[in-house]
Amino acid sequence: MSEPTSLVRRLEVQLGSKMVSGVEVNGETTIEVLPENWLAVARMLRDDAAWQFDLCVDVSGVDYLSYGQVEWDTTDATSEGFSRGVEGKGPGRFDWAHRPRNVDFPRRFAVVVHLLSLNHNHRLRMRAFCADDELPKVPSLVDIWPGVNWFEREAFDLFGIVFEGHPDLRRILTDYGFVGHAFRKDFPLIGNVEVRYDPEKKRVVYEPVSIEPRVLVPRTIRDDSRYEQAEAEREARNK
């Protein structure tokens, strides 16, 4: 019997129950593991001679709240165009009591790492969903790939994901008095406070936000037969 050649299939064979799922799309390989297997799988991917993922290119957080939802009305739009999205259902424009519920992703927060094997010329994306939405956390990978130190601090700062075992987990992009986590989908688009330098007090002061929120999300065009017909007519005219 020949050895399986698919990267996902080879990982399934070696990881077994430690791997929740795996998929290959457009030449990109993604696997999902449970938080409790995060360290074990990462260490195996680095140390096993069959893989040798010696470089962790990036670590990022993901907030799946309102994932796949847009403020533009693209399902029942009239011939006059698309809705401008004034209902305030997009990220940063809904209040917590009326937050969207995403049934496709029962867990809200996830951590994603991108790995590179220089020896085998393989790239791999690994994801784990945090078990607790109130206090999202996963083990730190600093002991395996020391270069992820600042990446994990960024994910902590912007998403509020706690990396257990990190040697210096504190904010890195926002200031010390910042309230909340700016990349969470329920964080207001206009922020919570304004910051400016007061020449009289000779220090930075925090004040209530004075600007009005605007809808800046891009229009998402769904599959629509009208566009296909228009394209066919355009090609017919150009012949």
Image: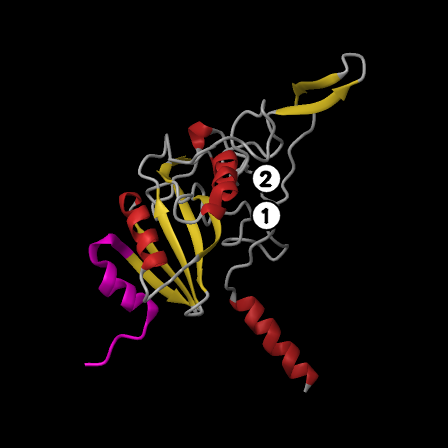
Contact (Cβ within 8 Å) of mark 1 with mark 2: yes
Residue 11 is one of the magenta-drawn residues: yes
Residue depicted at 31% across the width and 75% down the height = 5
143, 82: nearer the viewer: 143
Task: Check disc 2: other Cα within 10 Å, few if <14, some if 14-19, many if 20+.
Answer: few
Residue depicted at 30% across the width and 51% down the height = 33
The residue range painted magenta reads 1-20
Residue depicted at 52% across the width and 64% down the height = 224
Residue that numbered label 1 is attached to? 83
Residue 73: x %, y % from top left: 54, 49
Residue 86 disc label: 2
189 over 115 or under it: above or below: above
Residue 17: x %, y % from top left: 20, 55
Query: In the visual, does 16 lie left or right of 142?
Result: left
Helix, strand or loop at label 1? It is loop
27 over 79 or under it: above or below: below
Helix, strand or loop at label 2? It is loop
Residue 131 is one of the magenta-drawn residues: no
Task: Check disc 1: other Cα within 10 Å, few if <14, some if 14-19, many if 20+.
Answer: some
Residue 53: x %, y % from top left: 40, 60
State how far apart marks 1 and 2 are (Cα). Answer: 8 Å
- The amino acid on which the numbered mark 1 sits, given as a three-letter code, is Ser
- The amino acid on which the numbered mark 2 sits, given as a three-letter code, is Val
Query: In the visual, does 199 lie left or right of 57?
Result: right
